[in-house]
Image: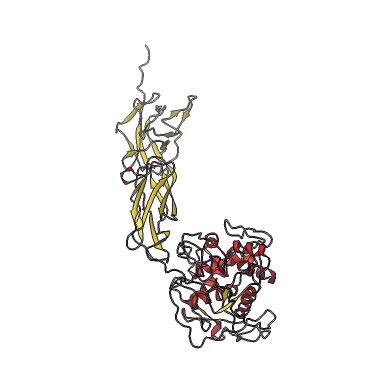
Amino acid sequence: MAAQFGHRLRRGATTAAVAAAAVAALSASQAPAAPQADGGTGDRAAAGATPSDEAATGNSPYYTDLPPLATPNKPGASVNLPVTGSAEAGIPASVLAAYKKAEQELAGTDAACRLPWQLLAAIGKVESGQARGGKVDANGTTLSPILGPALNGQGFALIKDTDGGAYDSDATHDRAVGPMQFIPSTWATWGQDGNGDGRKDPNNIYDAALAAGRYLCAGTRDLSLATDLDRAVLSYNHSTEYLRTVRSWFEYYKRGTHEVPDGTGVLPAGSGGGSSSSPTPSPSTNSPSPSPSPKPSGTPSPTPTPDPSVPPTTPPPTPRPDVFGSLENAGTGTLKATAGEEFDRRIAVRARNTQGALLAKVQVTFTVVGDTDARFAGGRTTATVATAADGTASAPALTAGEKTGSFKVTAVAGTTKPRTLTYTAGVTARVADTLTRTDGKAMTATAGEAFADRVTVTTTYKGTGVAGTAVTATMITDAETPAENDKGPYFTDADGKAVRTLALTTGDDGLLQLPEIKAGDTAGTYKLRLTTASGATVTVELKVEAAPETAPEA
């Protein structure tokens, strides 16, 4: 279902049973369906994808741009070619960058596949004429959608709508979409974010090229092997004519290419540059006229004639700019808060129409989900907000409750086919930032006795008592670097033995009263230090007075 370039190739019909299988598996064009397994999915199949061992070989027609007769050099000549060639060897800058970026990404995540960028260029040439000669914006998105014919069973496969028209603006039947011509159901499985903007857009050459690369690398394919490369191309469209055409462009691009400015790529004479929602300007006058597709052996095959039995395709409907298409994260980062406090940021989303433009007045419902007492303003668990002129909507302020842990917040927009984003939020317990003694009584005792008063402290966070705070109480020396003192006052353990360090915990209100302190036998001034994990410290002075002398008995 690539752009209509004036040369229609029909795949040979086989049995009715096989043709029926093809209708179920593929669109009428190069739009990919489930790939072949080639020996197993391995770790390289996309999440949720199940590669198929059965190749579809139906007789649905597809449209393609045939390779030119003139190549950078004759077949079989030296491979040491300059990176230049005829006008046909020029690939638009953004399109070429997308292919090379996809190759680099696959080399890092799936090196065993050995994907060459020239294979993506060959498929991109056949599918859309390199995104209509590179008519893309600065982010790599086509200036107008590239849409194949409606897959309505009339000369094409019958594939009823799977995306609510979100990608192809057709809520009745699916159409292949974008420069690499994915059908929406396939994109739902294989779609990628190749340019890092947080979206998976089949109309973006970076996203589409990476998705095509991962699709071609499904299973355990090694594209440096001719048989695996053929299987990969046939999984995109199981047709020997399609394979021969892609192979011709693949060899052509391997022999030399050069970069041209976006929008100046060569389209075949008489083509409209692909089916789209808006007309495409006529190609430049130096575009070569269509010529036969060379077979792998180098022998040119005759140009196929149009099949009169196939009805002409109807132009796709013009997408309405006010139809909701997608919902995306508008920069919301990690959501975190301390118990009882407002979250440090608000959830923000962005709505777009079916053409990818920002869309206002879309109702977005935010909902708190999970075992949590976090609430939006007013104690609500849901809130509905309309997107502004820039397509964005922000949820009301969200305040954490006392329950710690994580929970979810969803953002939902759309009615016919809702789009949902899910955010994870986390609530952490309060950590005491202050440790304070509740009174300033002097702690004095006589040697050999116990202190009459108890030391009491409180731990707080922003003035509120924090229960369960760990506090360490240590009798310390008065040295420059204090250490545990082995003389003077002490606590006793359960066995009545003297200990000079205790691990304690505050109560529900953040209060802690220390156990009784024994004065010891040696008079002097000593120190008791109390600390928390957050570094809050209190030091208490303990004064031990000598026991009074007793008068001798007469």
Q: Nearer the viewer, residue 467 or 369?
A: 369
**In screen coordinates, is 58 left or right of 169?**
right
205, above or below 411, in the image: below
Work out which residue is located at the far left of the displayed protein and give it.
440
Q: Nearer the viewer, residue 30 or 334?
A: 30
Q: Is residue 498 magenta?
A: no
Work out which residue is located at the far bottom of the displayed protein and give it.
286
The answer to whether residue 462 is seen in the rendering is yes
Picture coordinates of residue 426 (x, y %)? 43, 47
Work out which residue is located at the far top of the displayed protein and give it.
554
Picture coordinates of residue 168 (x, y %)? 47, 65
**In screen coordinates, is 422 left or right of 39?**
left
**In screen coordinates, is 311 left or right of 374?**
right
Work out which residue is located at the far front of the displayed protein and give it.
309
Q: Main secondary structure of the magenta part?
A: loop
514, above or below 325, in the image: above
State the residue at coordinates (68%, 68%).
14
Picture coordinates of residue 368 (x, y %)? 40, 46
Q: Is residue 153 magenta?
A: yes
Which span of residues is magenta-colored? 149-158
17, above or below 480, in the image: below
Location of the C terminus (image quadrant):
top left
Res 72 → quadrant: bottom right
Res 214 → quadrant: bottom right
Picture coordinates of residue 271 (x, y %)? 51, 80
Q: How is the image coloured?
A: secondary structure
The answer to whether residue 55 is seen in the rendering is no
